[in-house]
Amino acid sequence: MGYAAATGTPLQVCRPAESAPELDFQTDVVTIPVRLCNLPPLNAVASQVLALTADPEIELRQLSAVIEGDPAFAADILFLANSSLFGFPSRMHSLRHAMALLGLDRIKSLAVTVAMRGFLGKPNPLIYQCWQHSVACALVCQELSPIFGLSGDRAYTAGLMHDIGRLGLLKTYPEEMTPVLNGQFECTADVLRAEREALNVDHARAGAYLLENWALPKDLGEVCERHHDAPKAGNSEVLQVVTAACAVADAIGFPAVQCRRQLSYADAALPLTPRPGRKALPPEEELRARVTLRLAAFAC
């Protein structure tokens, strides 16, 4: 049994199924904090949208039929479609009109954003701190997707979801997670260690557990669990893009947790040599400005 670092009280845990993937860190018993086990999933429509966005053959009419099953969810997507982010001169009054103008990929990205905002619930400074990092990572993923030969919406979805374990732990164990998120660490490994000391699990494993428990696409669960791992030959392209984008998001000023040993933008972008005929990452200030603009439009 673990102990909550902030309170010194016993921490109840539940055990995932035997088929759950192995942890990267060494432990005799794999445990997940019980409140995280009981965290409600994303709403039904949001879960269906996330499953559909993993299918490259999905059609607008299929996505539209699912989204329109939840009028409030559809209204949130329409609100974002009419935001200053896209700057259309006339207002879009229906989801299908928005889909026709924005296209499938943008609608997928907006749907995932609405799903995640719903998961966040009532915002507070620490939730917003984590949300900023997730949005920044998602937008950098979009920028990097051509370098890795990925569709922009798939890369965006993976980037937005990669830290859902941190958000889940913060929602269910705010007292234990607050010192971690407010802390200053030497490097990411120290952050993960602090989370494990507080809750017996770090946000990478927590995210993989949540997505597996919610039956969401497996490649997203792998991204959650392994986005802080050292790059390896054979890693999936979606994992490679999120790992790189996470470092870039930190470098341009949107870290979830402060670390003293943090890559500069130039160093984070150095391995990202574009393929012939594909664009490179924009200058640091330009990318920071784009992320700031999108965060204003996506304010939760």
Image (cartoon, rainbow, N blue to C red):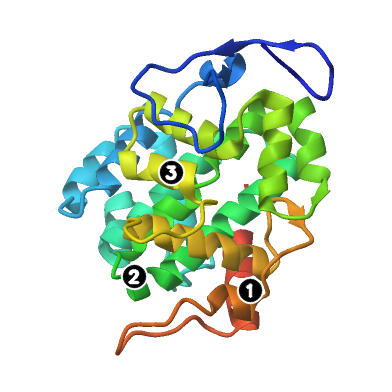
Q: Nearer the viewer, mark 1 or mark 3?
A: 1
- Name the residue that disc number 2 marks: 148
Q: Is residue 79 above or below residue 19?
A: below
Q: Earlier in the sequence, mark 1 or mark 2?
A: 2
Tell me which amino acid carries mark 2.
Phe
Quarter of image, res 16: top left
Q: Earlier in the sequence, mark 1 or mark 3?
A: 3
Q: Earlier in the sequence, mark 3 or mark 2?
A: 3
- Name the residue that disc number 1 marks: 288
What kind of element bears circle 1?
A: helix
Residue furthest to the bottom:
277
Q: Nearer the viewer, mark 3 or mark 2?
A: 2
Tell me which amino acid carries mark 3.
Ala
Q: Is residue 289 above or below residue 71?
A: below
Identify which residue, 69 or 201, lies in the foreground.
201
- Residues at circles 3 and 2 in contact by the CB criterion of under 8 Å: no
- Name the residue that disc number 3 marks: 75
From where the camera sits, is residue 42 visible? no
Which residue corresponds to the image point at 56% horizontal and 31% vertical from the top-left?
A: 26
Q: Position of residue 291 (x, y in %)?
A: 59, 68
What kind of element bears circle 2?
A: helix
In what quadrant of the picture does the N terminus appear? top right
Q: CA distance from mark 1 to mark 3?
A: 29 Å
Q: Is residue 278 above or below residue 57?
A: below
- In this image, 167 relative to 149: left or right? right
Which residue corresponds to the image point at 56% horizontal and 56% vertical from the top-left?
A: 135
Identify which residue, 48 or 99, lies in the foreground.
48
